Image (cartoon, grey):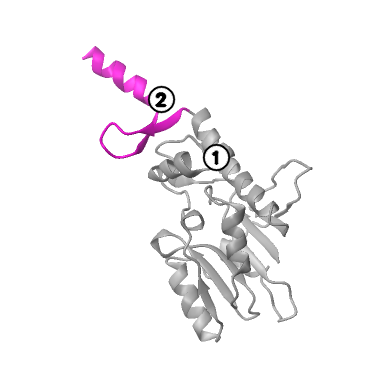
């Protein structure tokens, strides 16, 4: 099986703009990518990072990097099987900061023409494609679209219920999950940037240390 990991290298994670500056978003996105690649590497499958711009990586790492600045749907479809003799292709998103080798092995081992690990809000966080006629469409609720596409071509579809594969990191609230359940670079990156868990209001959230200090100083000055 060949694993494709799409990566938006130029303007990653724009919905984290309320809490991270552009350079910080880039550093954090790279940390999540490396965690995903580490988990994939341990499964033993060949991996290609499809990046929207050139991307430097440690030469010792096994993943190949190719540049493809087309929209996500077109870039992925260009790499899916076109015949039954072709090798199956898995697509794993680069922002699955909680993923583990075990979660991916379960995805890869599940039989079916198309296997999907959906995300929250009906997205498609990871999938395996074995059917030569299946093509992705990542616009809107892509999981629903992918179910329809599979039905139209008569492909067997299996759905994986996985917390770790189902949690993509897009919004500031998602940083809680990274700090609680992340395994390596991504949570360490957030801590280096000053984020920590906050339970002051009875629910678990995140607070940035420098922001908390500034808020406290403002309160004291009133």
Tell me the element at label 2.
helix
Q: Is residue 92 left or right of residue 161?
A: right
Query: Percent position (x, y) of residue 122?
Result: 41, 65
Query: Quick one: 191 or 19, which is closer to the camera?
Result: 191
Q: Is residue 69 left or right of residue 149?
A: right
Magenta segment range?
A: 194-222
Query: Quick one: 133 or 207, which is closer to the camera?
Result: 207
Q: Residue at x 64, y 76 (%)?
A: 130
**Cα gap from disc 2 to disc 1, whole angstroms:** 17 Å
Q: Is residue 102 left or right of residue 81?
A: left
Query: Quick one: 6 or 182, which is closer to the camera?
Result: 182
Above or below 172: residue 84: below
Q: Which residue is mark 2?
A: 209
* Residue 138 appears in view: no
Task: Say which label, 2 or 1, has the lower sequence index.
Answer: 1
* Residue 145 appears in view: yes
Is 89 within the magenta? no
Above or below 172: residue 149: below
Furthest residue in direction left, as rendered: 222
Q: Residue at x 73, y 72 (%)?
A: 87
Give the number of the disc on residue 186.
1
Q: Alpha-carbon neighbours of circle 1 within 10 Å: few (<14), some, or many (≥20)?
A: many
């Amino acid at each position: 099986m060949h694993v494709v990991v799409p990566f938006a290298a130029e303007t990653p994670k724009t919905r984290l703009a309320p809490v991270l500056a552009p350079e910080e978003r880039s550093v954090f996105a790279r940390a999540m990518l490396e965690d995903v690649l580490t988990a994939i590497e341990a499964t033993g499958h060949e991996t290609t990072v499809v990046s929207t711009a050139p991307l430097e990586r440690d030469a010792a790492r096994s993943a190949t990097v190719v540049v493809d600045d087309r929209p996500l749907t077109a870039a992925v479809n260009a790499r899916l099987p076109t015949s039954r003799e072709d090798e199956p292709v898995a697509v794993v998103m680069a922002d699955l900061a909680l993923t583990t080798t075990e979660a991916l092995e379960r995805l890869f081992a599940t039989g079916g023409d198309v296997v999907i690990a959906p995300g929250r809000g009906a997205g498609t966080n990871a999938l395996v494609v074995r059917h030569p006629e299946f093509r992705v469409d990542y616009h809107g609720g892509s999981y629903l679209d992918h179910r329809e596409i599979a039905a139209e071509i008569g492909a067997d579809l299996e759905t994986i219920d996985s917390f770790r594969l189902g949690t993509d990191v897009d919004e500031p609230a998602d940083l809680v999950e990274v700090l609680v359940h992340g395994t390596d670079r991504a949570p360490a990156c957030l801590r280096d940037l000053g984020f920590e868990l906050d339970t002051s209001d009875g629910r678990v959230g995140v607070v940035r240390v420098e922001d908390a200090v500034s808020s406290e100083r403002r309160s004291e000055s009133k």
